[in-house]
Amino acid sequence: MKSKEELVASSKKFGWIAGLLLLAMIVLSAIGKKESSPATEVVVEVAPLEGGKLLINEKDVLEMVGTVYGYTLEGRPTGQIDLQRIEKMLENDPFVLNADVFLNARNSVNIRVQQREPVLRIIDNNALNYYLDKDGVKMPVSKRAAAHVMVATGNIPPHDPGFLERKRHLLKEVFLLSQMLREDAFFNAMIEQIHVSNQGEMTLVPKIGDQKIFFGKLADADKKLEKLRIFYQEGMPYEGWRKYKSIDVRYAGQIVCKKR
């Protein structure tokens, strides 16, 4: 026969178990009710790029979601909406860097999109026209807006997803040079185009003036850029922007200029 203390302990234990079962039933009931309740609306927020540009907008996002589901999400039971599936689908789009999809307390489906930011536009001799982002990922030209970035033209090989991992690749040289120019405030404001010759040598085109800057290969790029910086900052103001037809920094220790 159990003692009074044992009976009390058993009663408390039973009470805890009963309480936990009741709580579980309440939670499951709430989840079931939540999943059967309809989505009230879909709210899309696309974070703009610098300058407020949208390469993809709310309409584009809603069209992509509609293509996957074949119907609008409003009015659908929330339990039938696969939020992770929507995220993965959006992140497969070349304009999307990251997507966050969640359901709030009011059964509103919220979609937040971070755009992939183009840093270089490629227009090659084969009429291929596309962007590269900061990681070298290929992006199509947007029908919504043009990104005002540096342009690379000429004899550029086709994009290869692993081109930055290759030891030698001409597109890699172009991309790395554009990165050096972009990260330098002086050259970012000055250079607008990189042109690649049939011999694989690069020529820079400035925004001010119409000189051609013969740069050559990527080798010793930092030294070439420093020579060019000194020439523009110290020599060019005295000589005038329009005096020279071309500026050549391909040769070690010197700059060769041709007058008009």
Image (cartoon, rainbow, N blue to C red):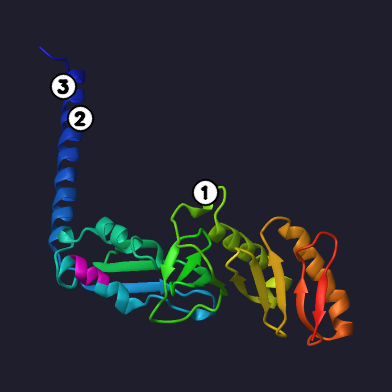
Disc 1 to disc 3, C-alpha distance: 72 Å
Task: Determine crowd level at label 3: few under 14, some 14-19, many 20+ residues with C-alpha closer than 10 A.
Answer: few
- Whichever of labels 3 and 2 marks the residue nearer the N terminus, that label is 3
Q: Where does label 3 land, which residue? A: 7
Placement of the N terminus among the 4 image quadrants = top left
User: Is residue 175 among what the camera can see?
Assistant: yes
Residue pictured at 84% horizontal, 73% vertical = 231
Compared to residue 41, the image places residue 82 above or below, namely above
Q: Is residue 184 visible?
A: no
Q: Amino acid at mark 2?
A: Lys
Q: Position of residue 216 (x, y in %)?
A: 68, 64
- In three-dimensional space, the C-alpha distance between marks 1 and 2, rounded to whole angstroms, equals 66 Å
**Nearer the observer, 15 or 200:** 200
Give the crowd class for mark 2: few <14, some 14-19, many >=20 residues within 10 Å: few
Q: Residue 12: which numbered mark, if any? A: 2
Residue sitting at x 87%, y 77%:
235
Amino acid found under the numbered disc labelled 3: Leu
Whether residue 173 sits left or right of residue 118 in the image: it is right
Q: Which residue is mark 1?
A: 165
- The residue type indicated by label 1 comes to Glu
Please tell me which residue lies in front, 160 or 60. Answer: 160
- Residue 37 figure quarter: bottom left
Q: Can you tell which quarter of the image residue 172 is in?
A: bottom right
Q: What's the magenta region?
A: 64-68
Tell me the chief SS of the magenta region: helix
- Image location (x, y in percent) of residue 73: 19, 70
**Is residue 177 part of the magenta span, yes or no?**
no
